[in-house]
Amino acid sequence: MHIAILTGAGISAESGLGTFRDKGGLWERHDLNDLATPEGFARNPTMVHDFYNMRRQTVRAAQPNPAHHGLARLQKHSQYKVTLITQNVDDLHERAGSDPVIHMHGTHLVALCAACAHRWPAPARMQPQDRCPACGDGVARPDVVWFGETPYHMDEILPAIAGCDLFVAIGTSGTVYPAAGFVELAREGGAETLELNLEPSDRASAFHAARFGPASQVVPTWVDELLSR
Ligand code: OAD
């Protein structure tokens, strides 16, 4: 059985990383047009770098939680083929032992040259005067996909979703496309679909089944059930 899993900010919430749209979430406290668009970066690179520098520091201090560990267990020790796709820009799946992890929105632990697309490990503190070490000229930005930009690895993701037997969305509000449309793509391909979330997401009615509760509890329980089959 091929299981395609999509994770969102909710899976990292119990590791202390804030989500975007919950009460008190990042996009309630900050304007995403300022911090998560190429135009916002062009207007005020210092502010954008400060935001991602702060988030990078928070991520480095955070630890994976039982939900990340559960998925790593599923990926490593099972008879199932597991495609793990995340919208998260943190590395908690990798630190829990998942491999491979498809980062469709990139990662802020990597720097990207806006001119030549060279990538290198992001320093703890990125600044507007940083230049690309490869071409020496291009402006360095966090390697995250901003609104208005195309998510990464879609050539790999779309066939995996369309061809899977079970699609599971974990800790995502289902408000940002194209990820929010994966459930329909999976259903069109004949897959069963399952939502694991703290509470029903905006797309809850699109799934065949759902389980609600904190990811640190719901995910390991679901994984244990699959592994004991
Ligand atoms: P959101 O903040 O939109 O949604 C988080 C979801 O996690 C909500 O549905 C919550 O109910 C759920 N949640 C919160 N705590 C949870 C917990 N402990 N256990 C399980 N679920 C929990 O985050 P995303 O859906 O990931 O993109 O957001 C998608 C994209 O929007 C992000 O990748 C980011 C953002 O703008 C970019 O920056 C391009």
Image (cartoon, helix red, strand yellow):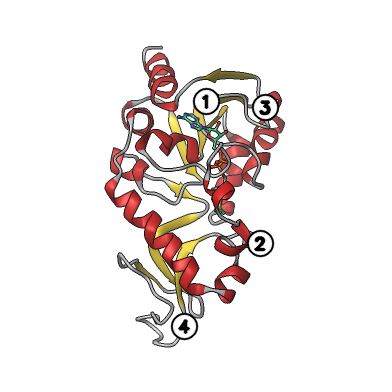
Q: Residue 198's mark?
A: 1
Residue nearest the viewer, comparing 52 with 25: 25
- In the image, residue 95 sits, relative to residue 116, either above or below, namely above
Identity of the residue drawn at 53% across and 43% down: 25
Look at the numbered disc 3 and say if its residue's Cβ is closer than 8 Å to ligand 1.
no
Identity of the residue drawn at 57% across and 76% down: 42
Look at the numbered disc 1 and say if its residue's Cβ is closer than 8 Å to ligand 1.
yes
Which amino acid, by three-letter code, is at mark 4?
Answer: Gly
* CB atoms of marks 2 and 1 within 8 Å: no
What residue would you read off at disc 3?
190
Mark positioned earlier in the residue sequence (2 or 4)? 4
What residue would you read off at disc 2?
148
Q: Is residue 97 left or right of residue 8?
A: left
- In the image, residue 141 sits, relative to residue 94, either above or below, namely below
Say what secondary structure mark 3 lies in: loop
Mark positioned earlier in the residue sequence (2 or 1)? 2
- In the image, residue 160 sits, relative to residue 145, either above or below, namely above
Which amino acid, by three-letter code, is at mark 2?
Answer: Gly
Mark positioned earlier in the residue sequence (4 or 1)? 4
The spot of residue 153 in percent (x, y) is: 53, 54
Of the two numbered discs 4 and 1 in the rendering, the one whose residue sits closer to the viewer: 1
Of the two numbered discs 2 and 1 in the rendering, the one whose residue sits closer to the viewer: 1
Q: CA distance from mark 4 to mark 1?
A: 42 Å
Of the two numbered discs 1 and 3 in the rendering, the one whose residue sits closer to the viewer: 1
Q: CA distance from mark 4 to mark 3?
A: 45 Å
